Amino acid sequence: MVRKIRILKNKIHLSKDIFLSGYGKYYVGYVGRDNFGDDLLLDIYEKLSNEKVLPLLDMFSLQTIPKKPMILGGGTIIGGEIYLRTIKKTGLVPETVFCAGVIPGGVSDEWRSLLRNSVVYTRSEKSRDELIASGVSAVSYVDPAIFVSKIYPREEEKDSDGYIVLGVHGKHPNSEYMIEVINSAKKNGFKVIYFASSPEDIRVARRLNNKFGGELFHGWKCLRSSVNIISRAKAVVTTRLHPGICALSYRIPVKFIAYDRKHEEFTDSVKLPELLVKDTRELSEFLENVAQGRSAQYVGDNYWVDKFDEFKSIFS
């Protein structure tokens, strides 16, 4: 019911905003659904391009919109039926794809036709190769969230208590891993902040918080506050993808508890497959190393962050 109300609100907001001035382009993505990662990618695009875009996902049937350039946003987008329906409703064709990922087996004839004349940037070589194999020209880059430290410089604050950010997922609770992180964090003197990227994560986060203590954080409510929480953490362990990518941007030690191939896609794209957790025992070793200052192996290098100016020039 909550999701249906949110979708209806999005449709109403779109109907009110669509004829307002100031929107140079449309942006199709998983937007308006209270999701930290997808809202962050939209925000990054606006800051890179220095223009205000109108997010599109939820539209009334037969709704007409003025003709403007369209961007297909970041995230696991290409092949998604909801995005295809939205684009078809507009009657427009995306001019650029903002480093999206490909849903496995999702490059249908309709998607191939849709992207024939688009400039397609993907978030990895893997997604690029899938598109090329399907007959769509594409160029690979990386998930844009890796540049968040360039867009939101770390806020300097007085010494804060050491804490671990634990990114939970409402549909993939991974209880054994979560409990291992919490117990290891306490053993090493760290507080735990349960980071909910979306309202669907709240139930899992609240249950852990009530049982083990710590602090609950609503990551979708304010991007700047969310990024700040991540940037000052001692370490991040996350099931959700984008809190971990943000951590890596700030060179915060990170481990991913994967539930989907997109985690592997990202870690391969930054050549850090060791950031994927394969066994719960890795987590206690990870947090012990962080506590002892032995964390260089979990932060990689600055290769992609240092390419920010090049990346920005593409979309500005």
Image (tube, helix red, strand yellow):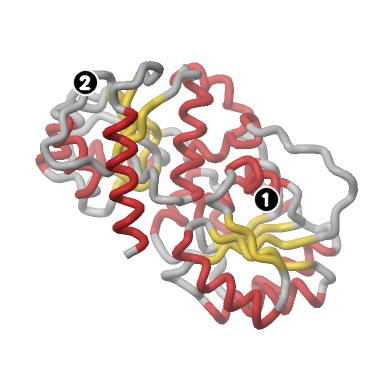
Q: Quadrant of the N terminus?
A: bottom left
Nearest the camera: 95 or 121?
95
Nearest the camera: 3 or 148?
3
Q: How many marks?
A: 2
**Which secondary structure, mark 1?**
helix
Give the x, y percent position of residue 105: 21, 53
Give the x, y percent position of residue 293: 84, 57
Query: Do the residues under discs 2 and 1 have CB atoms within 8 angstroms?
Result: no
* Three-letter amino acid code of the residue under disc 1: Ile
* Mark 2 vs mark 1, CA separation in Å: 39 Å
Q: Is residue 201 visible?
A: yes
Q: Is residue 119 visible?
A: no
- Write the residue at 44% across / 64% down: 200
Q: Which residue is mark 1?
A: 230
Is 226 situated left or right of 101 in this image? right
Numbered disc in front, either 2 or 1: 2
- Write the residue at 59% across / 73% down: 206
N-terminal of the pair, mark 2 or mark 1, is 2
Is 192 situated left or right of 32 in this image? right
| Disc 1 packing (10 Å; few <14; some 14–19; many ≥20) | many
**Which secondary structure, mark 2?**
loop
Is 204 situated left or right of 52 in this image? right
Give the x, y percent position of residue 241: 50, 54
Residue 211, labelled with which disc? none
* Three-letter amino acid code of the residue under disc 2: Pro
Q: Which residue is mark 2?
A: 66
| Location of residue 252 with respect to 113 vertically, above or below | below
- Write the residue at 47% across / 40% down: 143
